[in-house]
Amino acid sequence: MTLTTLNNCPAPAKLNLFLHVNGRREDGYHLLQTVFQLLDHGDTLHFTLRDDAQLVRVTDLPGVPQEQDLIIRAAKLLQAEVQRRTGALPRGVDIAIDKVLPMGGGLGGGSSDAATALMALNRLWNAGLSREELMALGLPLGADIPFFIFGENAFAEGVGEDLQPVSTPDCWYVVIEPGVQVPTAAIFSAEGLTRNTEAVTIADFSRHLAERNSANGFGRNDLQQVASSLFKPVADAVEWLGAYGEARMTGSGACVFGAFSTQEEADEVLSNVPPHWSAWKAKALKQHPILSML
């Protein structure tokens, strides 16, 4: 039976458990090291084949024109690749999205949406691309996209595309959305950004985890100081959540997270979050919910 729809496809959030800037390449891209953690919280996408070749986002996303949306751009790349391989343009698709993750939050929302689109359409179109081929297809659109297609928690290096699977703590996270969008470019171009943090290894992270049963205390987010100085709500959220344990910003911000051993601990903290912030809890995932599609 030929599939014509794929509904309820998750696009999970990610956290950067630490994020180090080790240098900058001649082309301006920064060299990073990080551990990506998948969360059981995110957007949901729905795909329905059309009778023409159009790719249509049927959900309005304020501030994101369809032609700029990473979902549509990723779908166009895969559609063109299928045509190149088979000589035939695959059917168009209506794409709906239940948008939960904030933009400019450091949670990888746009990249995760694009990755889910690539994985789902690879299946819907019977395109047959491997995980590695989809990762390579998505990389030009965003350095985080290959991680979501990789589908496992990962130690990442380079621009973020050099990935190795890594074990991470089985815990709960509380995430605060401070209510500001942090533009990534502004953080990476800031004069005060640390760009020479000494490199660590995956073994260093794994050893720390084995000794403490927690990622807390390993490294830092080199972007946090700059983001906190430019956006006071980020600094305020770090300070508030820090009263309950280590609090860190994820990615280039703005969201701030803390790790907790149990759901009950997470709930206790959530119940105290000031009402002017959005906040939620999420369980750590070991792998992407639709990794089995590949």
Image (cartoon, rainbow, N blue to C red):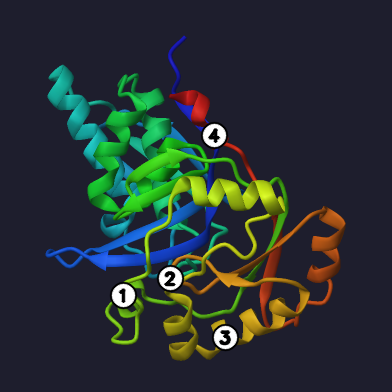
- Alpha-carbon distance for marks 1 and 2? 8 Å
Given the image, on which type of amino acid does mark 3 rest? Ala
Q: Circle 2 sits on which residue?
A: 252
Label located before the other in sequence (4 or 1): 4
Q: Which mark is residue 7?
A: 4
Q: Residues within 10 Å of mark 4 (few under 14, many from 20)?
A: some
Given the image, on which type of amino acid does mark 4 rest? Asn
Q: Relative to 152, does residue 234 appear above or below in the rendering?
A: below
Label located before the other in sequence (4 or 3): 4
Q: Position of residue 92 (x, y in %)?
A: 30, 33
Label located before the other in sequence (2 or 3): 3
What residue is shown at x 51% (from left), y 69% (from top)? 220
Labelled pair 1, 2 in contact (Cβ < 8 Å): yes
Position of residue 116 in the picture relative to residue 288 (left or right):
left
- Alpha-carbon distance for marks 4 and 3? 38 Å
Comparing 74 with 226, the one in front is 226
Q: Circle 1 sits on which residue?
A: 188
Labelled pair 2, 3 in contact (Cβ < 8 Å): no
- Alpha-carbon distance for marks 2 and 3? 13 Å
Q: Relative to 211, does residue 267 appear above or below in the rendering?
A: below
Labelled pair 4, 3 in contact (Cβ < 8 Å): no
Q: Which mark is residue 235?
A: 3
Quadrant assignment, res 261: bottom right
Label located before the other in sequence (1 or 3): 1
What residue is shown at x 30% (from left), y 40% (from top)? 75
- Alpha-carbon distance for marks 1 and 3? 18 Å
Given the image, on which type of amino acid does mark 1 rest? Phe
Labelled pair 4, 2 in contact (Cβ < 8 Å): no
